[in-house]
Image (cartoon, rainbow, N blue to C red):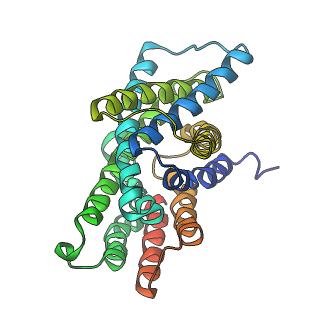
Amino acid sequence: MELLRNPRLPLFIGGALISLSPVWVKLVSVSPTVSGFYRVLIGGGALAVFLLATGRRLELSRRTLGLLLLGAAFFAVDLWSWHRSIIYIGPGLATLIGNFQVFFMTLAGLLLLNQRPHARQLMAIPLALTGLVMIVGIDWQALPKDYQLGILFGLVTAVTYAGYMLTLRQARAQAKHRSAAREVAVVSLLTAALLGIAASAEGVSLAIPSVADASWLLSYGIISHCVGWLLIAGSLPKVSAAAAGIALLLQPALSFIWDILFFARDITPQELIGAVIVLGAIYLGSR
């Protein structure tokens, strides 16, 4: 019973569910922007139906709505960048780099929330960079252009992911209700609107080409986004900004495993050691 009351348990479950996110992105044949659009549209729509069916009122203040709009902007850029990183360098590495958000959250916790980092967290940063170099190599110029772009998109993902997490945390901290469904539904639909505008600007169609693609997108929206992020968002205000990354370590770890199992990613012993070092650094940074 004590375990069930632990606010980190929903983070573990949510982290496991969202670890499947890059798998859906890799499987669908639509553009990265369109897959992001349907993720938040389906997930946010499902939550909106749940709120209507249970008769729950929105009950969000103007300040909270403002925070959610800012969070949607962060999340839209996060998905836009991350989905491209997945295509260029694979689900495992893209998710691993995206979870450098832990270090940006620690920095933001220091600057905005007066949460001083522990020495272990500071040591984790060069450790993470060492592991990353072991995975991608030292000679940046020797990497293919797409691979370079994938890494850069992954770093943009990390920054905007941290911004989204912290913004959602602040919005949840002001809430008078226990369920995070309202905040996640609103921020999801706002993000869908922003990604829909982005798709239009890019000149890509929002049409879903096949039943298989519809199935992957539905799984992405319901399993990984709706259920996964609902569990995560509900726990954010109950833990510190840095501690929120501990359970989310499951996401990059499992995503790397899915990349190897589902997409036959080739991995050398050096890359494997580098991935373990990065995961260890993320763990230390989360503490």
| Residue at left offset 38%, top offset 61% | 97
**Image location (x, y in percent) of residue 175:** 56, 23
Q: Is residue 92 visible?
A: yes
Query: Could you tell whether 77 is left or right of 15 in the image?
Result: left
> Toward the viewer: 32 or 9?
32
User: What residue is rendered at 44% in x and 19% in y?
Assistant: 65
Q: In the displayed structure, does residue 9 sit left or right of residue 252?
A: right
Indicate the quadrant where residue 62 lies: top left
Could you say which is closer to the camera, residue 276 or residue 188?
188
**Is any part of residue 114 visible from this angle?**
no
Q: Residue furthest bottom?
A: 269
Q: Residue at point 41% right, 60% down?
A: 94
Residue that protrudes farthest toward the right in the picture: 1
The image quadrant that residue 102 belongs to is bottom left
Q: Position of residue 46 (x, y in %)?
A: 64, 28
Residue 172's place in the image compared with 152, above or below, is above
- Residue at 29% x, 79% y is 137
Query: Where, by quadrant of the figure, is residue 136 drawn?
Result: bottom left
Disc tally is 0
Q: Nearer the viewer, residue 137 or 4?
A: 137
Q: Position of residue 16 (x, y in %)?
A: 63, 55
Position in image of residue 96 (x %, y %): 44, 63
Q: Is residue 159 above or below residue 190?
A: below
